[in-house]
Image: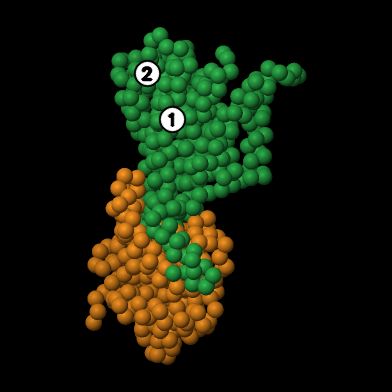
Chain colours: A orange, B green
C-alpha cells in the first residue's frame, strides 16, 4: 500500500448554524486520481477550502504527509505542495497567460525583494526553465498560442483550463481540482483526465470534485461520497455504484 | 525671479515629485495598495532631514536616515493593511497622516511647531550664483530619481513584480498560490515610504525651510493625479504624470494672475485639479501610458522564439 498523503480526521466546519462540513474522514494515498462526489450543497467545496487553509476547521485535524496543517496559512500549505484549482477560475485578468502560469511556480528565487533587484543572475536561468515548463503545460491545455493574451480576454472554458494549468505549474504533490471538466468540451475534458492519469502514474496525486460522473468514474481509482457534510460511502468506482448510500445522496431516500 | 530660474526651479520640482509618483506607483499602480497618506512619509523624511541636519549630520546621512525612518512608518501602516478592506485602509492611512501632521504642528520641539524652522541646503557652495546652486540641486535630485527609477524597473520586471500584480488583481488567489501577501505588502509600503521620505528630505533642503503647512493632504492628492494621469503600473507613466501635473500646476498659478475672477483665484488650481481627476477617470481610466508588460530574460526569449514562426501558428 502506498503512503498516506492526506489524512482528514473528523473535520467539521460550521457557518453559524449551517453545518457545511460535519464530520468528514478521508485517507488519501499517494498516486492516482481520487474522486469526491455528492449533490450540490453537500459540502465538497467547503471541505476543499478547509483543506487549503482558507477556512479554519471548527474541529478535527488535517494532516498532509504526516504534518498537521490546521493552523497553517494558505501560502504555507501551498509551499508544502498541496495545491488547488478553483471551481470558478481566479486568474489575474490584466496579466498575460504566461505570467499567470509563472506566478504559480513554487520556490522561485526571483520572488524575493533583494534577489529581484540586486541578484538577477540568481534567478534568470531558473525562470527560463520555468517558462519552458509553462509552455509544455500550455501546449497540453491548448493555450499555447495565447501566451501573450491577457487572461481576462480568454473565454470561459479557456480560463478554466488555465486555472488547471496554473495548478500543474506548481508541481504539486497533491492537486485539488474542483470540477475540472465543467464548461470544457467533452473531448478535451476527457483528454485532460487522461493526461492527469498519466501524471498520477509519476507520483502526483489528484483529489477531484466532479459532477460529470461518467468521466470521473472512468479514471478515478477511489471515490468518496459526501452528503449533508458527511462522508457517507467510499469505494472503487465499480463498487460504489452498488452502494445504497450513493443513490440516497443523489436521489434522497 | 527671471525665466531661467523659474524653469530650473520647475525642473527640481518635477524631479522631487517624480520620486513621489514613482513610489505611489509601486504601491497603488503595481500592488493595489491605496496609500492616501503619501504626504506623511514625505513629512517624516522632511522633518528627519531638518532635525538631523540641524544636529550637524552630513546631508547624505540625513537623506538615508530620513528614508529609513519613513520606511519604519511604512511598515507600521502595513499592519492594518492586512486586516482591512481596501477602502477602509485608505481612510485609515489618510487619517493617520493628518494626525501626524497635527502633532508636528502643535509640538514646538519638533522643528518649531507651526512656525517651522530653517533647513541648511545639502550642498552649499558660498559665493556661487543662485543658478549654479539650483543646478547642483538638479544634479542631486536627479541622481536620487535615477536610483529610484532603476530600482522600480528592476523590481517590477521580475517574478517579484509578477507577485505584486497578482496581489493587486486578487490577493486571496495570490495567497492561495503561495504568496505571503503580508510580507509583500509590508515590503512595498516600506520601499514606497522610503522613497517618499527621500523626496521629503530633498524637498526641504532645496526650499531651505520646513513647516507643517507644506504637508497638507492636497500633496497626497497631487501625487495621486500624477499616477492616475501618467498611467498606473507604468514607471515611465509616473514620470510623465509628475511632469505634466507640475507644469499644469505652474500654469494655473500663472494664469490666476492674468485672470480676473469673481472668486479667490488661488482656489482655481484646486478646482482645476478636481476637474482633471474627473476627466481622467471618465475618459482615460488607464492613464496616458498603458500598463507595461513584465519584461524578464525568460519572457524576452519566448517573445523572440515566437516571432519568426508566428505565421506557421506554432509558437516554439
Question: Which labelled disc corresponds to residue A198?
Answer: none
Look at 57% across and 14% down and name the residue there. Answer: B2
Q: Chain of mark 2?
A: B
- The disc, 2 or 1, on the residue closer to the chain's N-terminal end is 2
Image coords of residue A100 (percent x, y):
45, 60
Q: Chain of mark 1?
A: B
SS category of the residue bearing label 1: helix
Image coords of residue A212 (percent x, y):
50, 81
- Residue nearest the observer in this picture, B175 or B154: B154
Corner quadrant of residue B256: top right
Look at 51% across and 19% down and name the residue there. Answer: B213
Residue B113 visible in the shown view: no
Look at 45% across and 53% down and name the residue there. Answer: B294
Image coords of residue A181 (percent x, y):
49, 76
SS category of the residue bearing label 2: loop
Q: Is residue B52 above or below residue A170?
A: above
Residue that label 2 marks = B123
Corner quadrant of residue B119: top left
Q: Is residue B169 above or below residue B215?
A: below
Q: Find the distance from the CA under tag 2 to the CA under tag 1.
A: 14 Å
Position of B259 with respect to B3 (left or right) is: right
Q: Among all residues in the image, which is located at the extreme top?
A: B127
Q: How many marks?
A: 2
Amino acid at each position: 500500500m502506498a503512503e498516506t498523503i492526506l489524512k482528514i480526521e473528523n473535520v467539521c466546519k460550521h457557518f453559524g448554524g449551517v453545518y457545511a462540513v460535519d464530520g468528514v474522514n478521508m485517507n488519501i494515498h499517494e498516486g492516482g486520481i481520487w474522486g469526491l462526489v455528492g449533490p450540490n450543497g453537500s459540502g465538497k467545496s467547503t471541505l476543499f477550502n478547509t483543506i487549503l487553509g482558507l477556512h479554519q476547521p471548527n474541529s478535527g485535524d488535517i494532516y498532509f504527509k504526516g504534518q498537521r496543517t490546521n493552523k497553517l496559512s494558505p501560502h504555507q500549505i501551498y509551499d508544502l505542495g498541496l495545491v488547488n484549482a478553483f471551481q470558478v477560475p481566479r486568474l489575474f485578468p490584466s496579466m498575460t497567460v504566461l505570467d499567470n502560469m509563472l506566478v504559480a511556480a513554487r520556490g522561485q528565487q526571483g520572488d524575493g525583494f533583494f534577489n529581484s533587484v540586486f541578484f538577477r543572475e540568481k534567478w534568470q536561468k531558473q525562470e527560463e526553465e520555468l517558462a519552458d515548463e509553462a509552455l509544455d503545460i500550455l501546449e497540453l491545455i491548448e493555450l499555447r498560442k495565447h501566451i501573450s493574451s491577457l487572461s481576462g480576454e480568454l473565454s470561459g472554458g479557456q480560463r478554466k483550463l488555465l486555472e488547471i494549468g496554473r495548478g500543474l505549474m506548481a508541481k504539486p504533490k497533491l492537486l485539488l481540482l474542483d470540477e475540472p471538466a465543467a464548461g470544457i468540451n467533452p473531448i478535451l475534458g476527457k483528454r485532460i483526465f487522461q493526461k492527469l492519469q498519466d501524471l498520477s502514474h509519476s507520483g502526483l496525486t489528484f483529489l477531484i470534485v466532479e459532477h460529470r460522473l461518467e468521466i470521473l468514474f472512468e479514471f478515478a481509482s477511489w471515490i468518496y461520497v459526501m452528503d449533508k457534510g458527511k462522508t457517507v460511502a467510499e469505494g472503487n468506482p465499480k463498487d460504489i455504484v452498488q452502494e445504497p448510500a450513493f443513490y440516497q445522496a443523489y436521489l434522497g431516500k | 525671479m527671471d525665466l531661467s530660474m523659474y524653469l530650473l526651479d520647475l525642473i527640481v520640482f518635477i524631479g522631487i515629485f517624480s520620486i513621489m509618483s514613482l513610489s505611489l506607483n509601486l504601491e497603488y499602480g503595481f500592488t493595489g495598495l491605496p496609500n492616501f497618506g503619501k504626504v506623511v512619509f514625505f513629512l517624516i523624511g522632511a522633518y528627519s532631514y531638518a532635525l538631523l541636519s540641524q544636529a550637524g549630520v552630513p546631508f547624505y546621512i540625513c537623506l538615508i536616515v530620513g528614508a529609513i525612518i519613513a520606511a519604519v512608518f511604512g511598515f507600521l501602516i502595513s499592519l492594518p493593511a492586512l486586516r482591512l478592506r481596501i477602502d477602509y485602509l485608505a481612510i485609515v492611512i489618510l487619517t493617520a497622516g493628518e494626525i501626524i501632521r497635527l502633532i508636528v504642528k502643535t509640538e514646538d520641539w519638533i522643528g518649531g511647531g507651526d512656525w517651522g524652522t530653517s533647513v541648511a541646503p545639502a550642498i552649499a557652495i558660498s559665493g556661487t550664483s543662485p543658478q549654479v546652486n539650483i543646478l547642483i540641486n538638479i544634479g542631486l535630485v536627479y541622481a536620487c530619481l535615477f536610483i529610484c527609477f532603476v530600482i522600480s524597473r528592476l523590481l517590477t520586471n521580475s517574478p517579484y513584480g509578477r507577485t505584486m500584480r497578482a496581489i493587486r488583481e486578487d490577493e486571496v488567489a495570490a495567497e492561495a498560490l503561495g504568496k505571503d501577501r503580508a510580507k509583500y505588502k509590508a515590503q512595498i509600503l516600506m520601499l514606497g515610504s522610503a522613497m517618499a521620505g527621500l523626496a521629503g528630505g530633498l524637498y526641504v533642503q532645496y526650499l531651505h525651510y520646513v513647516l507643517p503647512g507644506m504637508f497638507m493632504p492636497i500633496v497626497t492628492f497631487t501625487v495621486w493625479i500624477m499616477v492616475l494621469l501618467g498611467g498606473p503600473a507604468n514607471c515611465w507613466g509616473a514620470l510623465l504624470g509628475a511632469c505634466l501635473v507640475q507644469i499644469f500646476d505652474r500654469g494655473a498659478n500663472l494664469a490666476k494672475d492674468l485672470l480676473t475672477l469673481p472668486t479667490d483665484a488661488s482656489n482655481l488650481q484646486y478646482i482645476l485639479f478636481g476637474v482633471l481627476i474627473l476627466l481622467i477617470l471618465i475618459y482615460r481610466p488607464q492613464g496616458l501610458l498603458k500598463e507595461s508588460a513584465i519584461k524578464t530574460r525568460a519572457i524576452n526569449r519566448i517573445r523572440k522564439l515566437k516571432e519568426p514562426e508566428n505565421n506557421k501558428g506554432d509558437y516554439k
